[in-house]
Image (tube, helix red, strand yellow):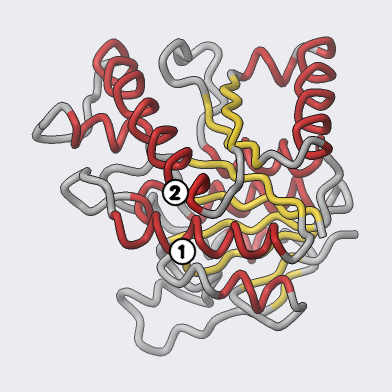
């Protein structure tokens, strides 16, 4: 199976912005094992700005673009150093790809991205993809890594996109405030009713939320790629997903 796994800032970092070492180690171990089992693994990773906030000891996520870009520059080094170190322990090689919206919108750049990604998979590497926050501005920003993950999954004709989040999946209501909220296990169409279930963004260090995940799902299912939202706090769920078991919310492609 060709799997694109997107992991969010809330999974990779503590609320302080410092790296969540236990979670990152667990994620890398599971992904390495899935690759050992014969699956192709592509990781779309948030966390550069969040890690930069922690590394620079900033009191909060910056709001101005220059400081965001500075935090991303520092955090991206930390992020890739961590992935390189942990995946190397399981004898896997990582490759970094940083993108902006201009890279996706340009036919030539998009084709180059597709070719590079395909060749990396052929060579047995694990591509780690992130938005290039160090140069992206409001005019050229993709906006969130849920969207980037969907674009990647469609571009490379993935079998499955898994969005690892701080929630088990899509619920009938906000489970944090409504005890009667029920997990929706399957969705075959992004209807206005489904869209209405999206609340606000997640943690203070993240940029996404359920709304961005539903937009990503819409992109995937319209282009033949199944998508699952699952809990990033339990990376071992990826084993069940790879075995076809019901986990989180699955969006079924047309």
Residue 200: x and y in percent read: 39, 52
Residue 183 location, quadrant: bottom right
Q: Is residue 248 above or below residue 154?
A: below
Q: Is residue 85 above or below residue 41?
A: above
Q: Is residue 24 above or below residue 96?
A: below
For the residue pair 22 and 67, the one nearer the viewer reads as 22
Disc 1 or 2, which lies upstream in sequence? 2
> Quarter of the image containing the N terminus?
bottom right
Q: Secondary structure at mark 1?
A: loop
Residue 174 location, quadrant: bottom left
Going by the image, does 9 lie left or right of 122?
A: left
Residue 93: x and y in percent read: 61, 39
Going by the image, does 2 lie left or right of 71?
A: right
Residue 182: x and y in percent read: 51, 85
- Circle 2 sits on which residue? 86
Calculate the distance from the C-alpha at mark 1 to the C-alpha at mark 2.
18 Å
Instruction: Say which residue appears at 72% left-offset and 76% top-offset.
Output: 186
Neighbours of disc 1 within 10 Å: few (<14), some (14-19), many (20+): many
Instruction: Say which residue appears at 80% left-offset and 16% top-offset.
Output: 112
Residue 163: x and y in percent read: 58, 56
Asked if disc 1 and disc 2 are in contact, CB closer than 8 Å, the reply is no
Instruction: Say which residue appears at 29% left-offset and 22% top-offset.
Output: 74
Residue 142 location, quadrant: top right
- Circle 1 sits on which residue? 232
């Amino acid at each position: 199976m060709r799997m694109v796994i997107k992991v969010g800032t809330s999974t990779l970092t503590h609320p302080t912005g410092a790296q969540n070492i236990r979670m990152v180690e667990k994620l890398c171990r599971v992904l390495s094992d899935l690759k050992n089992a014969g699956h192709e693994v592509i990781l779309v990773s948030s966390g550069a700005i969040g890690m930069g906030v922690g590394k620079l000891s900033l009191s909060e996520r910056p709001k101005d673009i220059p400081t965001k870009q500075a935090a991303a520059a520092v955090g991206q080094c930390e992020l890739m150093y961590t992935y390189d170190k942990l995946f190397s322990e399981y004898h896997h090689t990582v490759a970094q790809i940083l993108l902006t919206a201009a890279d996706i919108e340009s036919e030539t750049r998009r084709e180059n991205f597709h070719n590079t990604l395909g060749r990396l998979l052929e060579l047995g590497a694990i591509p780690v993809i992130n938005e290039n926050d160090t140069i992206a501005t409001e005019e050229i920003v993709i906006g969130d890594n849920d969207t980037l993950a969907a674009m990647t999954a469609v571009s490379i004709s993935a079998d499955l996109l898994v969005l690892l989040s701080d929630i088990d999946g899509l619920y009938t209501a906000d489970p944090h405030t409504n005890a009667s909220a029920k997990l929706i296990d399957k969705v075959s169409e992004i209807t206005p009713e489904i869209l209405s279930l999206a609340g606000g963004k997640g943690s203070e260090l993240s940029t996404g939320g359920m709304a961005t995940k539903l937009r990503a799902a819409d992109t995937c299912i319209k282009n033949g790629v199944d998508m699952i939202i699952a809990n990033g706090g339990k990376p071992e769920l990826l084993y069940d997903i790879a075995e076809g078991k019901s986990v989180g919310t699955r969006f079924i492609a047309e």
